[in-house]
Amino acid sequence: MDGCVARVDRIGYGVGSGMLVAAICAIPDVIVATLWGYRVPASLPGIVFAAYLVCGGLMGAVFGVASGWFQGRRSRWADADGAQAGIRAACCAACLAGLAAVFVERLRLGYEGYLDRETGLFPAVAAVLVGLLCASRPPRLLYGRSWSVLGWPAFCAAAFCAFWQPYVSQYQAATFSKTSLLANAGYCVGWVALYLLLRRPAQWVLPRLVADGTRGSLVGSGITVGVGLVCAAGVLWCRSVAPIDKAYNPTFAGGLATAGPTPSVVLIVIDTARADHMSMYGYPVDTTPRLAAFAKESVRYDRAIASSSWTLPSHASLFTGLLPTEHGAHNIPHGDGWTIRPLAESHVTMAEILSAAGYRTGAVLANTACLSREFGVEQGFLYFDDRAKPTLEAAKIRSISPALWLCRGYQRSLEGWRTDWSRNASEVNADALDWVDRDTDSPFFLFVNYLDPHAPYHAHGAFASRLARVADHGRPAQMADEIARYDQEIAFTDAQIGTLFDELRSRGVYDDTMIIVTSDHGEAFGEHGSKGHGHTLYDEEIRVPLLVKYPGASVRGVRSEAFALTEVAGLVYEELDISFAAGIDTGADRIFAELREVDTSFAATESVPVMRALYDASGGKAIVSSRGATEYYDLLADPFERCDLSDQRFDRLERAIARVDCWTAGVAARRRAESDSVAISDALRERLMSLGYLR
C-alpha cells in the first residue's frame, strides 16, 4: 500500500513539475507566435499554453513512473527528495532537448544542402544528445544556486530559437551575414538581461513552489500561464488592426445636387447566388422565405443580368455603372496563370458620389479575396472592412516553433477541419450593425457582402429537413449533395438577411431606407459542362436576383424585362435626386455581360479573347466571342439554353454582332486610362486559391 502511495506521489509530482517547466518554456514561444504571425486569433495563446501543459504533464508522468525504476538502482534516487530532484532534472533535460531540436531545424535554413530536409534526422540526433548530456549533469537554470556548463549556451540557444528565424522571415535577411550575426548577438544579450532581471525572484519563488510538491508545482504553473497570457494579450492588443476608417478626399468635383429628404441606402450582395435557386423566383424548394416576404414590399426584377460571371468585374460594374471593358477591372494573362487589374482611381464609384453628397459610407465584406482594397473597390468608402476573420485554422505563424507544430496537430485532430478566412453571414451582420450604430442620425450608405453560397458549400442542419432535394434541370446526379448544401447556404444567408432587416427595424431606420438585394453572379452545376463560375455566360452564371425596396415601400411590383446590374447605380441616383450621370450610358443596348476568356493554353498571348452575352427585348440572347464563336437562344421558349438557334436566327445574330462592334468601337474612342495590374500579396493569393481563382 505504501508503495502504491509513493508511486502516485511520484507520478503526481512528475505531472506538476513537467507542467511547470513546460509553462516556463511556453512563454517565449507564445509571444513569438503572436508577435510574428498574422490572422492570429485571441484563442491562440490559450490553446498553445494548454498544449504545452498537456505535453509537459504527460512527460512528467512518464518520468514519475520511471523514477520508481531508478529508485532501486541509483542511490541518489533512493529517498523522496532524490526522486524529485531527478524528475526535475529529467523535465529540464527534455525541454532543453526540444530547444536543441528547434535550434538545429532553424540552423538548417542556412545549410539546406548539407542537412537532411525530409527525415529530420539532425534535429532528432541533436535532441537526443542534449537530453543525455543534461540528464547526466542537470542544469539549474532558473531556481538553482549555480549554472551548469550548459546554462548560458541553453539561454543563447533559446534566444536564437525564439527570435531569429521570425526576424529572417519578416525582413528577408540573409541567414548568415555580418548583420544577421550582430542582430542575433543582440537578441542573446537581451535574453541574458532578462535572466539577470528575473534571477533573484525566480531563485526565491520557484524552489519553494517545487519543494511543496505537486500542489506547489501546479500553483506555479498557473501563475506562469497567467503571466504568459497577459503578455500574449498585450502583444495581440499592440498588433491589432489599425483603424480602417479614413478621411475622404473627394476626387470627383462638380455637378452634385440633392433635393428633398435623404434616405439611407443599404446595398446587399449575396455572392454566388443564382436567381433560379430562390423560392421567390419559382424554385420548388423554400430557400428564401424572408426574401420572399421582402419582395412583396419591393420591386422584383425577374431577369436581372450581372455584368460578368465572377466577382471583381461584376462589383466594379455595380459600383460604377460601367461594363467590364469600360472600367477595366478584370483578370489578365500573365505567365503560367493570371493576375488582376484593379479598378482605376479615375472611375467614379457610387460610394464616392454618395460620400460627396454628405452620406456616411461603409462596407463590410465577407469576400475579402476578390473585394480586397488592393483591387480598388474601396474608393469612396470612409469605412471599408475587408479584414479576414482571425481563426486558429487560418492563423499563419511565421516561425518554426513548437507552438506551430502543436497548433497544426490540434487542427488536424478537429473533425471537419478547414481553413476558413471568411466571416459568415451572422458575423458580417454583427460588424455591419456595429458600424450603423455609430451614428443613426446621419444618412448612410452601407454595402454588405455575404459569401456563404460560394464554394466550398457547407451543410446547415437547421435547414436540411426543410430543403428537400429536387430534380434539377440538366444537372448530373452526382452533384445532388453539392446542390443540397448550396441550397442550405442560400437558406442560411436568407435567414441572416432577415435578421439584419429585423435589427434595422428595431433601430427605426428600415422603413425609410432604400434597400437593394442582389448577387454578383450565379453558379453552374454542370448544365453546360461547367461547374462553378467565371467560365461561361449562360444564365446559370449571370442571371441573378434583384429586389429594390424604396423608402416607405412607395413602389412595388414585378419587372419581367431584362435589366442590367449596371443600371442599379442609376436607380439610387434617381431616388436620391442626385444629378450625376457623367460617363454612364443606359438603355437596352447595354444589357449584356462580358467575360475575358483566360485559359492556360493561351495565357501567354497578348490578345485576350472576350465573350459577350447580349439580350434583346424579344427574349433572345446571343453569345458572341471575339474568337468568332456565336450562339443564339430564345429564352422564352428555352429558358435553360439547350437549343442553339444561331443557324435559324441568323438575322438576329447578325444584329447582335453589329451591336457589339459598334459598342466596342465607341468604348475604344472614349475609354478611360486603366491602372496597371497589382502584385498580389501572399495572404490575398491564399484567399484567391482557396476560392478556386488561382492554382
Image (cartoon, helix red, strand yellow):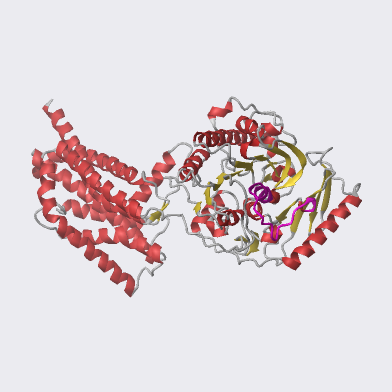
Residue most toward the front? 260
Name the one closer to the observer, 348 or 617: 348
At x 74%, y 43%, the residue is: 539
Q: Is residue 585 one of those drawn in magenta?
A: yes
Image location (x, y in percent) of residue 311? 62, 51
Image location (x, y in percent) of residue 580? 66, 57
Residue most toward the bottom? 178
Location of the N terminus by quadrant is: top left
At x 8%, y 39%, the residue is: 79
Residue 175 is drawn in which quadrant? Answer: bottom left
Image: magenta residue range: 568-589
* Residue 274 visible: yes
Image location (x, y in percent) of residue 560? 77, 39
Q: Is residue 193 one of those drawn in magenta?
A: no
At x 87%, y 52%, the residue is: 653
Name the one closer to the observer, 38 or 363: 363
Residue 392 is drawn in which quadrant? Answer: top left
Location of the C terminus by quadrant is: bottom right
Q: Is residue 632 left or right of residue 585?
A: right
Residue 379 is drawn in which quadrant? Answer: bottom right
Image location (x, y in percent) of residue 157? 26, 60
How many marks can you see? 0
At x 43%, y 42%, the residue is: 412
Q: Is residue 270 left or right of residue 564?
A: left
* Residue 78 visible: no
